[in-house]
Image (tube, grey):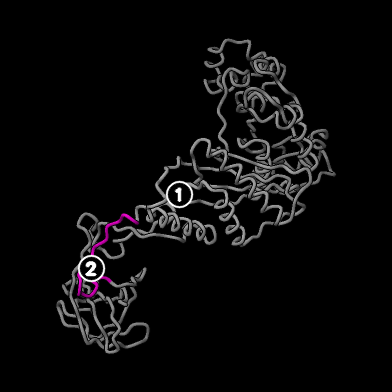
Amino acid sequence: MLLHSIDEAAVRAGLSIGLPLANARAICPELTVYDADPAADLKTLNDIADWCDRFTPLVALDPPYGLFLDITGCAHLFGGERALLQIVTHALSRRGFAVSAAIAGTSIAARTLTRYTSGQIVADGAEATAVGPLPVSALGADAAVTIGLRRAGLKTIGDVAARAPHEISARFGADFTTLLGHALGRGDAPISPRKPLPDYIVEKRFPEPIATDTVIALTLSSLAKMLVAAMDRQGKGARQLEASFFRTDGAVRAIMVETGRPVTRPEMIDRLFRERLDALNDPLDPGFGFDLIRLAAGRTEIVVRQQRDLDTTVHDNDEISALIDRIAARIGGERVVVHLPLESHIPERATLALPAQHHLAAASAAAWPERVTGEPPLRPLRLFERPEPIKVPFASVPDGPPHQFTWRRALHAVVRVEGPERIAMEWWKQDGAALTRDYFRVEDAEGQRFWIFRDGLYESKLRDEEGRPVPANWYVHGLFA
């Protein structure tokens, strides 16, 4: 059992990460120990990252204990870089976290500074001067590289930077040379934000936290108007919207809605979020109140203007799309589907269910096989997701229908039959297991119509191991109206 992480008191007592627990207890008998939980640490780091979204939308994880915040163009909103740094560090310190933070022109330089100092702000171009006095271990390179540098007499980052780059690369590799260059401000490794940057963001901060539903609804309405005004200047509408609620205790709740068509009206955005909030299984809990509410358009599209005064089709399509959006906001977009035809004779593969919000236009233009006038339908109105087995005591062979069958413990006497209709799997999809079905449209004595099929043919393969014939398997696949 080894020490996974330690606090400042343990460092002062002479303990270090990786030290065996028995040795640590011998050095410090009053040591308090907790089981390491990396999964909980990662969750806490993600929660802190959610809280940091209030400062900038570009937040990236730097496991196991670090975060990168790209504050380019954001610092002036909080009184400057120094004020922003103090806000972040003081807020996290009040919640019991040990915080080390720095601001620099490159992310690697800032991370290097946080390993041995805190609160430092480095001007652009001064990274080499700031990190030069730090020990080489501050770079965070592999232990073998750090030990090799010390053995070579290079104890500080400045000592390493004084060497020619080709000398460092020949001895310690190109990856370390790149890391060193980034720490010195010579280029930078791009960070990978946890969330994609939204196209448009509007937000409202409150000097006093709000907690009532009325104020929250009014705030969302005003933010919707601001968002629509910002998108309208570039002729765009929102396809994906996210409302984020930042509580005073650091918790963040995000609610997302999607639309089938670009939304350009604030009242529609307001209505979608009301539907979504009313349908939440876990209601929005303001706790001690929200001090920030943000509305973002994660995905937008250019709005195509259409003639809406005389064309009734456009109005109908708009109403259907709006209805689908409201239903999807309440029960989920994956539960509102449309069906598109596929080129397959296999019944369960002849249609494809897709979200209606994204495929409504394709469903409207889909070409389905037309029904022959005066003839009964070839396919049932209700098709089971999985064919249900039925018991057939006997049937006319080789291609005859059953005279009666038992389905769901009920006996049905067959009085009328249409078929068979033989359906076989495509030859390029058989993979040695050919599927052959003989379908029948049958009607029982009570007038109920079924779509049943026999799985397989009456051939030699329908025999057991001793060569005795076995009955074919029969199934009901759908019901006619």
Seen as rendered, the residue at the extreme front is 310
2 and 1 marks in contact (CB < 8 Å): no
Q: Is residue 133 above or below residue 319?
A: above
Residue type, label 2? Arg
Q: Position of residue 18 (x, y in %)?
A: 69, 37
Q: Is residue 404 above or below residue 259?
A: below
Of residues 312 and 48, the one nearer the viewer is 312
Q: Earlier in the sequence, mark 2 or mark 1?
A: 1
Cα distance between the residues tagged 2 and 1: 32 Å
Q: Position of residue 23 (x, y in %)?
A: 76, 39
Q: Which element carries disc 2, helix, strand or loop? A: loop
Residue pictured at 21% horizontal, 58% vertical? 426
Res 137 seen here: no
Residue 1 lies in the magenta-colored region = no
Q: Which residue is mark 2?
A: 371
Seen as rendered, the residue at the extreme right is 30
Counting other residues with Cα less than 10 Å from the Cα at mark 1, is it few (<14), some (14-19), or many (20 or more)? many
Of residues 72 and 328, the one nearer the viewer is 328
Disc number at residue 261? 1
Seen as rendered, the residue at the extreme left is 398
Residue pictured at 76% horizontal, 40% vertical? 97
Res 264 seen here: yes
Please report the bounds of the magenta region as a residue range: 364-379
Q: Which element carries disc 1, helix, strand or loop? A: strand
Quadrant housing residue 342: bottom left
Of residues 118 and 154, the one nearer the viewer is 118
Counting every numbered tag in the picture gives 2
